[in-house]
Image (tube, rainbow, N blue to C red):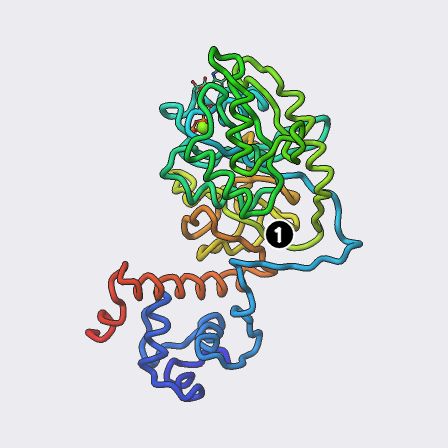
């Protein structure tokens, strides 16, 4: 089918040439009835009209939003747990993570308010644990919801001198909706007016009855700032993670979620990804949301170049044609061509969706004027 023209293909498909031209136009390519099409374009048009063609890619069968891959039990290996830290504004989430990491993220943050989800990997008792920090500000509900979705365990931080606040409740709701174990960290116990018992009573009212009161929620009393109770908290996490018996198959193409996407002046589209299953490798062909490309450079959370990332690992990659959005799913494909085809189809669907919602310029209107 090499070199088939728009007119010829349209005839084969029983479509008008104008329709074929429109499909390509929506994908960002201007063609005329006599333009010769390459393989990829032919494939995409065939996909659009739901017909068989050689090397057909069943894009419809790839449900990114709800990837369910069943691995053989024998292929599964223990993986690194993902722990999300949530709670109300200023209750000490970033300070806690900072103490766990023994670095200085809090000082470097603008105004001390977490603006986005930070992803870090830390070694606890010789085992790797991935931590996601989330903003407590009320404007970031969606981020907390996404954080809860990719997590294995949620730590809810409550300041002992403050109490259960709106975003504390919201964090509990997200964790419950995600069906993951909750560990409560009562923070700032060093402060005057700290009243851990009152916090427990308030949290019990939200359905998190402490173990020592006959419930099944583990509470840790800590001071993130004064480094009190941190060992016990980490010990608790280790136990909860072990009970969860987390496994993944490192010997498959990677898939997972976008933690953050941004445009970097020098590096282009940069995405922080969390590998949920499989192993992500440098130069892998990849589709991320509606973006695609090849993993050009892959960095770990400490900014070091790495060649591969195992399940549960957060990484930063470059090499995408667009900036993905937090919460988008990613998936590795066998060939770059496949990734491009799937990516372009998804981009087209996205454009169409935006157009239908009236958010973007109507390309249909535009087309009718050509
Ligand atoms: P957002 O990201 O804005 O939601 O806040 P956060 O929960 O990450 O709080 P952050 O770690 O930025 O801490 C807020 C303030 O509380 C900072 O001034 C910290 O120094 C202080 N703080 C955090 N933990 C403790 C603690 O254990 N004791 C005391 N006394 N102060 C703390
Ligand atoms: Mg913070």
- Count residues near mark 1 (Cα–Cα under 10 Å), then give few for <14, some for 14-19, many for 20+: many
Residue 307 visible in the picture? no
Determine whether, in the image, residue 190 is placed left or right of residue 115. Answer: right
**Identity of the residue drawn at 55% across and 20% down:** 196
Q: Nearer the viewer, residue 122 or 144?
A: 144
Q: Is residue 112 above or below residue 150?
A: above
User: Within 8 Å: ligand 2 and the Cβ of disc 1?
Assistant: no
Q: From the image, which quarter does the C terminus lie in? A: bottom left
Q: Nearer the viewer, residue 204 or 299?
A: 204
Q: Position of residue 261 (x, y in %)?
A: 43, 44
Q: Position of residue 307 (x, y in %)?
A: 62, 41
Q: Secondary structure at mark 1?
A: loop
**Identity of the residue drawn at 56% across and 55% down:** 331
**Identity of the residue drawn at 41% across and 86% down:** 8
Residue 321 visible in the picture? yes
Q: Position of residue 131 (x, y in %)?
A: 57, 34
Determine whether, in the image, residue 135 is placed left or right of residue 277. Answer: left
Q: Is residue 127 above or below residue 53?
A: above
Q: Nearer the viewer, residue 351 or 286?
A: 351
Q: Position of residue 253 (x, y in %)?
A: 64, 55
**Identity of the residue drawn at 57% across and 26% down:** 185
Which residue carries the number 1 mark?
254
Choose top left, top right, bottom left or bottom right for residue 266: top left
Choose top left, top right, bottom left or bottom right for residue 150: top right
């Amino acid at each position: 089918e090499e070199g088939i023209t728009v007119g010829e293909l349209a005839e084969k498909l029983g479509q008008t040439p104008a329709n074929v031209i429109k499909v390509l136009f929506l994908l960002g390519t201007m063609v005329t009835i006599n333009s010769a099409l390459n393989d990829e374009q032919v494939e995409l048009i065939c996909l659009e009209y739901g017909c068989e063609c050689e090397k057909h890619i069943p894009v419809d069968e790839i449900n990114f939003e709800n990837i369910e891959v069943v691995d053989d039990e024998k292929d599964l290996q223990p993986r690194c747990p993902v722990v999300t830290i949530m709670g109300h504004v200023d209750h000490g989430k970033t300070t806690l993570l900072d103490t766990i990491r023994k670095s200085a993220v809090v000082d470097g943050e603008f105004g001390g308010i977490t603006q986005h989800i930070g992803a870090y990997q830390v070694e606890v008792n010789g085992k790797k644990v991935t931590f996601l920090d989330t903003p407590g500000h009320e404007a970031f509900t969606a981020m907390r919801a996404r954080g809860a979705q990719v997590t294995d365990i949620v730590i809810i931080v409550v300041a002992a001198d403050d109490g259960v606040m709106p975003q504390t409740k919201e964090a509990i709701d997200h964790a419950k909706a995600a069906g993951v174990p909750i560990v409560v960290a009562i923070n700032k116990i060093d402060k005057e007016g700290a009243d851990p018992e009152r916090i427990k009573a308030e949290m019990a009212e939200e359905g998190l009855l402490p173990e020592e009161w006959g419930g099944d929620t583990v509470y840790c009393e800590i001071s993130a700032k004064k480094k009190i109770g941190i060992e016990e908290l980490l010990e608790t996490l280790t136990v909860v993670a072990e009970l969860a018996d987390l496994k993944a198959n490192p010997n498959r193409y990677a898939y997972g979620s976008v933690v953050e996407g941004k445009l970097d002046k020098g590096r282009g589209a940069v995405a922080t990804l969390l590998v949920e299953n499989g192993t992500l490798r440098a130069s892998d062909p990849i589709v991320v949301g509606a973006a695609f490309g090849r993993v050009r450079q892959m960095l770990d959370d400490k900014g070091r170049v790495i060649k591969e990332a195992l399940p549960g690992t957060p990484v930063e990659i470059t090499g995408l044609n667009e900036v993905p959005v937090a919460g988008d799913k990613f998936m590795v494909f066998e060939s770059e061509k496949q990734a491009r085809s799937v990516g372009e189809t998804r981009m087209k669907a996205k454009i169409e969706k935006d157009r239908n919602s009236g958010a973007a310029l109507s390309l249909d209107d535009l087309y009718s004027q050509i």
